[in-house]
Image: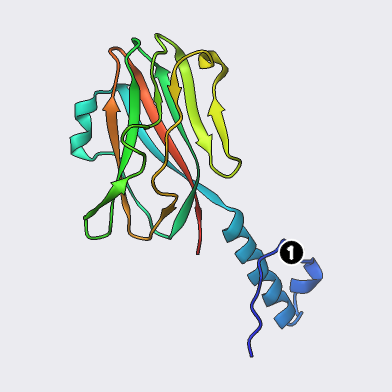
Amino acid sequence: MATELVGSKQIIYQEDVDFSSTNSESIMTKVSKAALYAQGVTEYVVPFVYSGYFRSNSITTGAERFVVTKRSTINRYVLSLGSTGSSVANAINIKVYDEDGTFVNDLFSSTFEPSILTASNINNSYIGYDILDSSNILSTNISAETLNYGTINLTTLEEGYQLVGEIISNSSNAINANFTLTLQRLE
């Protein structure tokens, strides 16, 4: 009967791998546990970047696209703006398609996309949500504005899913929208 290895931090001593030392089951177990631990704690970032003056009609090209290579969970997301422009909403969503290109769902509820709603001419602002800590992420320069942190429809993204960035709305003169998902592999 095989014993399952559980990922954990490992210390590998020089003596374990010194010249002429045997490549033992012990060192292979340490290496395997360290690799499993790294896989379990490593996050990766998926950016959707709209440089310059972005427009809601620019999403039809699907230029901002990401394919999920390993089943992953969403740990947090952040919408940031170089400048919010006027007091019209700046909102972002992500279309999710399966590996065959069939629409699965919008990442966020259509009435609650992450957005900065009434902040006018504010530079370097951001909002988001940390799912792991159940807490809002917020830059201090927009704390008194009307914001929507987003209501997520999917927390697990399957292998082969295609994510396509979508600009829902933008205010005039708003520049540099960036939406970042932080994912963690599940397997």
Position in image of residue 54 (x %, y %): 28, 23
Say whether residue 164 is left or right of residue 143.
left
Residue sitting at the far bottom: 1
Residue 18 shows up from this direction: no
Position in image of residue 80 (x %, y %): 44, 26
Position in image of residue 16 (x %, y %): 77, 73
Residue designated by label 1: 10
Q: Secondary structure at mark 1?
A: loop
Position in image of residue 15 (x %, y %): 81, 71
Residue at image position (74%, 64%) is 10
Say whether residue 139 is left or right of residue 120.
right
At label 1, which amino acid type do we have? Gln
Residue 70 drawn above or below residue 180: below
Residue at image position (32%, 55%) is 161
Residue at image position (18%, 36%) is 60
Residue 4 shows up from this direction: yes
| Quadrant of res 31 | bottom right
